[in-house]
């Protein structure tokens, strides 16, 4: 038996350009994915300058992040289904153009209200762009070995985009203006649009069933309330009754959504997509990664800037070790390991490696050095994350019917977004509690405050490490072991392209 990645002679003519340009298609998809991921962190660097320029208060600035996450997280499932119904290239292009327009509005905003509205609009188009990008990747690479390499590259970009955003945000804020942290998306999206028009073939969906509007309403409202509930917990605390009202209402709506999906003829999210044991384990791992990653980016940024006194530019460069090590773990090592050991072993090992890196951050002191403590931890964390991302994303989109590729991809992004929202609220509250407990009674000195803050960092990093141990358990206990040599084929999936004859092993 041999596996062929060449186009069959009887394949339609439209299939051949994508076969010829599939690696260039990967470049285009990677550019778009990098833009979406880095946008989540690049704005954090721009916040202080934007606040000074537009004059909004400390109690308002969290809406710069929350507006994006609310729109993005709640609309992902709808965006994924739209890409299945109306064609992935079409929705990919609409998402790119819309994201660029929203970024332009934000970059030109003269008021806080317009800036928040632009961030929400970015989230809307990001919810269309992210799942269509991943589903394009899923349906473009069907050969097991090529698919492992492609998902290795994609996983590296997904894992390192946040660190790249910190670096790019630091450079742009230092040498230009905070507005370019948004306007840079015009350049990135423009390159991706041209690449998509040239290298991504236009295909029509094979069928167009009615949209499950009941599922759309219950899923969107449920996800919105869950994300908003965690955002509310971050600002108003877990003791506020409204926090639990939002979370409970979101949970009820999501339960109704599940019931609806079991009964309608054309569900928004067919339950077969998430009930598969391997895909379910991968979705769980991705959600837990979202929790763990938050602790690294937010609290290590605070430590570098507030404790060690780094500038925004120096902080960005300090994180550079992470995307390098993620790329090494995902694209170079993970892509070669996945066909041999399968996702079960790779996710298990990667989760433990990343957790070890976070535990290394327990060595942080008020005067720790970058080379002695921070750099080794970032390198270990990034390598483990790279192993997890490449295997989990390939497994999460494996074996789905081609008409479900978009919604399966949307579920991947939903897990990341919900995991990040949980991490935001949970770790922030645990950090604040640890700082409060470490402060002495009475009037604390600056040294007491610094020591208590360090204790808060240690707590946040320890909980993040626990989340990454959970990633390892999700891989080791939930995902099934596959026969040697079959891992990539089964983890790589069989999703076919929009109107094309998929390549098969024969």
Image (cartoon, rainbow, N blue to C red):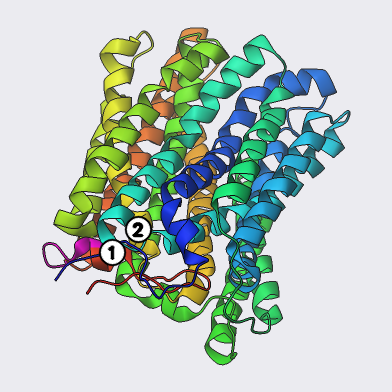
Q: What number is the disc on residue 491?
A: 1
Which of these two is toward me, 224 or 143? 143
Q: Magenta stretch: give its range.
A: 482-488
- Earlier in the chain: of badge 2 and badge 1, it is 2
Where's residue 119, x and y in %? 73, 42
Q: Is residue 412 left or right of residue 70?
A: left
Say how many tags the image has. Answer: 2
SS at mark 1?
A: helix
Dots 2, 1 in contact, CB < 8 A: yes
Who's the residue at 43% across and 25% down the image?
438
**Quadrant occupied by the N terminus:** bottom left
Q: Is residue 495 above or below residue 318?
A: below
- Camera sees residue 244: no
Q: Is residue 86 left or right of residue 115?
A: left
- Camera sees residue 221: yes
Q: Residues within 10 Å of mark 1 (few under 14, many from 20)?
A: many
Who's the residue at 58% across and 71% down the image?
84
Where's residue 97, x and y in %? 72, 47
Who's the residue at 60% across and 90% down the image?
264
Which of these two is toward me, 194 or 482? 194
Q: Is residue 183 above or below residue 11?
A: above
Where's residue 135, x and y in %? 50, 61
Q: Quadrant of residue 228?
A: bottom right
Where's residue 80, x and y in %? 58, 65
> How far is disc 2 from disc 1 in space, using C-alphas?
6 Å
Who's the residue at 31% across and 61% down the image?
5
Q: Is residue 253 above or below residue 259?
A: above
SS at mark 2?
A: helix
Residue on which the image places disc 2: 394
Q: Is residue 447 left or right of residue 95?
A: left
């Amino acid at each position: 038996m041999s596996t062929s990645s060449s186009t069959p002679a009887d394949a339609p003519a439209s299939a051949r350009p994508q076969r010829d340009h599939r690696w260039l298609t990967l470049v285009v998809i990677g550019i778009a994915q990098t833009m979406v991921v880095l946008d989540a962190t690049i704005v954090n660097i721009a916040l202080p300058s934007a606040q000074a320029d537009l004059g909004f208060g400390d109690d308002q600035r969290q809406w710069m992040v929350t507006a994006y996450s609310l729109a993005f997280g709640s609309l992902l499932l709808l965006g994924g289904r739209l890409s299945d119904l109306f064609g992935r290239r079409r929705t990919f292009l609409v998402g790119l153009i819309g994201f660029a327009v929203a970024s332009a509005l934000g970059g030109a905003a003269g008021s806080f209200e317009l800036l928040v509205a632009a961030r929400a609009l970015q989230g809307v188009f990001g919810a269309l762009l992210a799942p269509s990008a991943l589903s394009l990747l899923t349906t473009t690479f069907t050969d097991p070995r090529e698919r492992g390499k492609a998902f290795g590259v994609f996983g590296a970009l997904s894992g390192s985009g946040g660190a790249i955003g910190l670096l790019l945000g630091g450079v742009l804020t230092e040498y230009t203006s905070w507005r370019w942290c948004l306007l840079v998306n015009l350049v990135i999206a423009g390159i991706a649009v041209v690449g998509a028009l040239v290298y991504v073939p236009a295909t029509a969906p094979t069928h167009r069933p009615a949209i499950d509007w009941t599922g759309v309403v219950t899923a969107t409202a449920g996800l919105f309330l869950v994300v908003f509930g965690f955002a509310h917990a971050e600002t108003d605390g877990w003791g506020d009754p409204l926090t639990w009202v939002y979370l409970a209402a979101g949970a009820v709506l999501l339960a109704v959504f599940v019931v609806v999906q079991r009964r309608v003829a054309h569900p928004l999210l067919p339950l077969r997509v998430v009930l598969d044991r391997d895909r379910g384990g991968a979705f769980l791992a991705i959600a837990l990664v979202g929790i763990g990653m938050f602790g690294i980016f937010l609290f290590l940024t605070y430590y570098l800037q507030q404790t060690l006194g780094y500038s925004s530019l120096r902080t960005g460069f300090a994180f550079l070790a992470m995307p390098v090590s993620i790329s090494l773990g995902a694209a170079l090592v993970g892509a070669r390991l996945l066909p041999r050991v399968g996702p079960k072993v790779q996710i298990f090992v990667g989760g433990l490696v990343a957790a070890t890196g976070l535990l290394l951050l327990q060595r942080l002191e008020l005067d720790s050095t970058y080379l002695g403590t921070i750099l080794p931890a970032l390198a270990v964390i990034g390598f483990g994350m790279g192993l997890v991302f490449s295997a989990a994303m390939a497994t999460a989109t494996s074996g789905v019917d081609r008409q479900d590729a978009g919604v399966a991809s949307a579920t991947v992004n939903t897990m990341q977004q919900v995991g990040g929202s949980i991490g935001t609220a949970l770790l922030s509250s645990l950090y604040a509690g640890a700082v409060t407990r470490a402060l002495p009674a009475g009037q604390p000195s600056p040294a007491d405050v610094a020591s208590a803050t360090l204790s808060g960092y240690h707590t946040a990093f320890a909980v993040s490490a626990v989340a990454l141990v959970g990633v390892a358990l999700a891989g080791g206990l939930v995902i099934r072991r596959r026969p040697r040599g079959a891992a990539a084929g089964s983890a790589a999936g069989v999703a076919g392209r929009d109107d094309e004859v998929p390549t098969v092993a024969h």
